[in-house]
Image: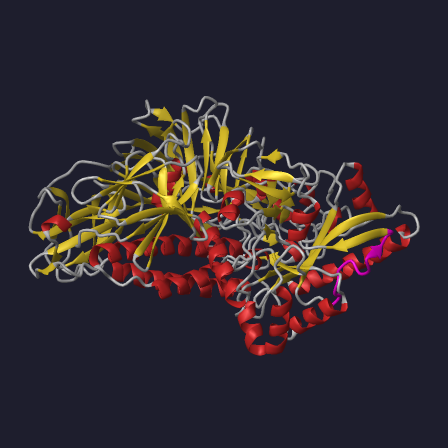
Amino acid sequence: MLSIRSKKFRYTCFWGVLLALLFLNKAEAQTAWYIDGYHGGIYGGYPENYTGFLVDMLNRNPEWRINLEIEPETWDKVQKDDPEAYAQFKAIAANQSAGGRIEFINPAYAQSYLYNISGESIIRQFSYGMSKIRAHFPNAVFSTYSSEEPCFTSALPQILTSFGFKFASLKNPNTCFGGYAAAHGGELVTWVGPDGTGITTVPRYTIEKLSNKSTWQTIGWENSPNYVNAAYAAGIKHPVGMTIQDAGWKGGPFMGTMLRFGIKTIYTTWRNYFENLTSYDSKPAWKLTQEDLLVNLVWGSQITQKIAQQVRVAENMIISAEKMASLAKVYSGQAYPAASLDSAWRTLLLSQHHDCWIVPYNGKPGATWADKVLEWTSYTDNKCDSIIKSSSINQSDVNNEAATYVRVFNTVATKRHEIVSVALPAELANKQISVIDSKGEIIASQTFDDTSLVSKKVIFNAAVPSMGYNTYHLQTGTKATFKGASVKKLADGRYEIETDLYAIKINPAKGGVIESLVAKKLNNKEFVDKANPRGFNELRGNFYKDGGFKSSEDHPASVQMVENGPLQIVIAIKGTIDSYPFTQYLTVNQGQQRIDLKVDIDWKGNPGIGVDTPPGTYKWQNPVKAFYDDRYKLLALFPLNLKGQKVYKNAPFDVIESRLSNTFFDSWDSIKNNVILNWVDVTDQQGKYGLALFTDHTTSYTHGADFPLGLDVQYSGMGLWGRDYKINGPTTISYSILPHAGKWDKAHVWTAGTVWAEQLIATVSSLAPAQKSVSRSFITINKPGFEISSMTCHGDTLLVRIFNAEGDASSRKIIVDGKIAKVQLVNLKGTPEGDLRMEPAGDKKTLINVAMPRFGIRTLKLTGVQALKY
């Protein structure tokens, strides 16, 4: 954000000079400390020869200390283009003690906001970033995590401490455009994460108010008398201000001379501040939740929406690709594609850069941040698709041209019974196709109405073990009849869908809303609040150019059958909202609890949706901004028949119960965390019944005592810095709902979200599997609650990262399909923290006992795995 923040710099300098004139002779002399430094890099901004400028400024100002948040790839370019300055800077940075002058405070590969990406992505941001920095600065020490942007998430204490960090800061006082942490406490706190891990942290002090002169600052952006005196009055012995300057600013020390405003400012690194100044200060525990991070972006805007979707697809694919490559390594001896996966992670991490999300339009035509995200994520997707395909090939099976087999892989640590759709090869010209399981039983049978099967798909319900695969046989000429899911049109024009789990009624006269959703096996619980004036799955928003609120219920819709049982029902609801055609797809599968939904909206032109902000009326200093108010955006609504509703929502490696009475705000100084990462779950007061809403991208959700659960579908209007966030084409969003009994953990909502993200992978082959290779489960866990966050190979070792998403702290039995020479618990740096006891589990399997608190993460290092080959 170099150009934008340069304007901000001139504006803040004006106020700095004014304050200096006002307070120079009036304020009592006080001592305060200051965190200065630089933020940016070759993507976010780092001018040519800037390293030489930093060296010159450090030499001219011997008392100056800097804290660096520079994109790690920057040093590759500096080393190549400016070797002399690179060597000089490296020499100054060699002193990594508390007395040193340079500290690396955010080694993340691309300075992500963190709260908007997966937990595993956060770990890789740090691991790849720290590795790159140490390639240039081998003795770099990472003591403190700090960021100029609100790059925070609740699970950081556990992640940071496992990487070796000792301290953190929750301040971002001079770049609060995207939000800020809640004000809390005094000099220090122990920031306690969801798993119970604590880290010593400087918070945004309770006295550190938001600025009334801007909408991007707290009063802690400079050591003004107002800020410093308030801190001393609150008992803060070592008040510290902070600005991590944009790389490119040429002012040198941000606070200028050591004496300013009558305040003696001492520049310091965070490491020195924590180790030498405040090491004996009290640090009361603060169990910060995700709702204490008051962050917001232009949610619902098409450009932000697409970025979030592209990142989510790439995140899901790369985790599946790593697991598939690991299974291929242990089961068939395939070479693990480490270099390809590293390159795929690089581009995914870059697409998570905070500037991609907050200034997506910045850059030259064809090279904006949004353009780069598409390029980066496409590279990741293509790499991962290739790895998944090559990893699913059965290299040791015997060729049998007369038969066709389908192998279905499951990369999740729970057994699954799910619908799989497989494209048939052209050589299967017979019109009757049956699917045979390992017992020789027909589990699906389909008849096709022509002889060209190139575009035809066979659908069957696959049973696949945990972290493993199962094999099915396709036969021609065999027929069987099955009963299952069905749909029929009623006399009154409504449609009724029946599966073994649900009875659903769709009303085309009201735009295709769901009028009834009855869960048969949950005591026939009706989940639709029929007394609510809003429809279930209704689209509604304020079209401010076209007369106000419009709804999909305003016009009748038509219903078309896409799949008509018995295993799967897919209907397409075609309607209009205002004058814009849309299609909503509803998919229900026999035996599947999750109901899948999708909406395609064919926009024409650029309708205004949300709160109207006429051109020329946007003011930086005005805290009220149109894009904050979700009540006026186009929403998909879900009024629920649940009394005394409670809301739970997930975050990276965390789930919280919401404290919000509603999710609404319209001003920068009253931001609420209304972010939906993967899912939001609403239950009744007693936790007897609930419904989870899943989304294919990070965005915002709505909920209130008198406002139904809703998903942000579209915003079009004024965004940050007065930019017009336009609609430039069709919108497509996938989302799902899951009615359930009990709270989110008992209903295994997190697992359901992981299953939705990591789809079953099916491949067709003419290779007949050996008898013992028909079905294998590489990792089985005896009780639910744990998930495998990642599985990767490193030489002859296998790293399996486990996350306790829903379980209690009791031990779980993890059974590995193979003999293992050694099992160790390692931290995120890869350092061993102890050996784990192994036991034989029969049939050449190994049992490992693992315990951790809820929301804990543990990484197992398995050495010398000998698994049965395919």
Q: Where is residue 518 in the image (x, y as percent from the top left)?
A: 34, 28
Horizontal and vertical percent position of residue 126:
50, 55
Q: Nearer the viewer, residue 492 or 126?
A: 126
Indicate left or right for 859 with 168 as reference: left
Q: Is residue 298 left or right of residue 403?
A: right
Is residue 567 in the magenta section?
A: no
Q: Give the quarter of the figure containing the C terminus.
A: bottom left
Snapshot colouring: secondary structure
- Which residue occupies 62% across, 45% down? 628
| Residue 367 relative to residue 438: left or right | right
Quarter occupied by the N terminus:
bottom right
Q: Nearer the viewer, residue 592 or 827?
A: 827
User: Nearest the camera: 478 or 840?
Assistant: 840
Residue at point 50%, 50% (across, down): 163
Judge whether 461 appears above or below 356 on screen: above
Which quadrant of the view contains residue 780? top left
Tell me where residue 713 appears, x and y as whole percent: 49, 47
Image quadrant in which you'd find residue 44: bottom right
Q: Could you say where residue 373 lies in the image, as x and y percent from the top left?
A: 49, 62
Residue at image point 37% right, 32% down: 739
Q: Is 714 situated above or below 854?
A: below
Report the label total.
Answer: 0
The answer to whether one can see residue 573 in this image is: no
Provide the residue span drawn in magenta: 250-262
Residue at image position (26%, 34%) is 499
Residue in the foreground of this view, choosing between 656 and 701:
656
